[in-house]
Amino acid sequence: MTVIQKNAPSIVLKGLSKTFSEDIRQANYILENVDLTIKQGEFYILLGPSGCGKSTLLNILAGFIEKSDGELTINGESEESKANRGFVFQSADSALFPWLTVEENVEFGLKMKKVPLAERKEVANHFIELAGLSGHNHKFPSEISGGMKQRVQLARVLANDPQILLMDEPFGALDAMTRRTMQKELIRIWKETNKTIIFVTHDIQEALMLGQHIGIMSIGPSSKITHSYEINLPYPREITSPDFNQYYKVVQSHFD
Ligand SMILES: Nc1ncnc2c1ncn2[C@@H]1O[C@H](COP(=O)(O)OP(=O)(O)OP(=O)(O)O)[C@@H](O)[C@H]1O
Ligand SMILES: [Mg+2]
């Protein structure tokens, strides 16, 4: 078992660039020279306007797409690292298996890893409970609400015990009230599990509700992280507090 020291750098990017062009001489860089360090157990927000390259960066961190240039290390290893990463997509509809129940969806990854039945039921139930879904084990995705589906997706990812959670606007499609509940749940789960979370959003309020650090990305092309803020506010955060408002104004000023 690898013991990961808390607050050790978990993810380091140096001069990372990405182009989708084949010909490097005519390259149109989506991301150019992105530098970023995220520590073990940190809740890090990537905030930026639509189309700037947030999903592209998150997909590179997930290992779904390749970088074009620069360095990426995860837990001190190159990007081929075996670090276990879990990805939460914007829409649970495309991520969940509609023919499987809540419980079967959550235990799916464990089943693939051939974890014995009794053990995987125990793990699945733990995360179903953590996600506030107890009593819904045997329902199908079509029988539960959008917020509940998103919690199933989260429980499924957590059941695989990733060291790093990558979340791409996971609450973007939810109504304001459900989004608020999900944000609270996520903070609770993060505190209980001490995962490293990288969360993409273009919503400043959401960024300030959740993040310990916020990295602001510039408008693309050639987007990079231009500013980084440490948010020194205790959880749960109060949207109406003067301190929250102060941070809001500072972050908002980058998008004026
Ligand atoms: N596979 C691809 N091939 C070519 N261009 C791509 C590809 N994927 C993304 N892009 C381009 O890269 C840029 C960044 O896209 P990306 O999806 O990363 O933005 P985003 O910040 O996540 O936007 P949003 O907030 O709207 O989700 C866009 O101009 C997009 O057209
Ligand atoms: Mg995106």
Image (tube, rainbow, N blue to C red):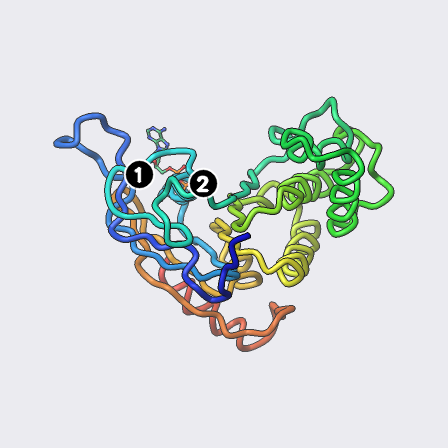
Q: Is residue 230 left or right of residue 86?
A: left
Q: What crowding class fits label 2: few (fewer than 14 Cα within 10 Å), some (14-19), or many (20 or more)?
A: some
Q: Are marks 1 and 2 in contact (CB under 8 Å)?
A: no
Q: Identify the residue at image location x=42%, y=64%.
A: 251
Outermost residue toward the right?
A: 135
Q: Where's residue 95, x and y in %? A: 61, 31
Above or below for 214 versus 221: below
Provide the secondary structure element on which disc 2 rests: helix
Mark 1 vs 2, N-terminal side? 2
Q: Identify the residue at image location x=56%, y=38%.
A: 89
Q: Identify the residue at image location x=65%, y=51%.
A: 179
Q: Residue type at mark 1: give it.
A: Lys
Q: Is residue 248 left or right of residue 107?
A: left
To which quarter of the image does residue 215 belong? bottom left
Quadrant of the rendering where the C terminus is positioned: bottom left
Q: Is residue 106 left or right of residue 224?
A: right
Q: Which residue is mark 2?
A: 62
Q: Where's residue 216, x and y in %? A: 38, 57
Above or below for 47 versus 154: below
Ligand 2 lies in which image quarter? top left
Provide the secondary structure element on which disc 1 rests: loop
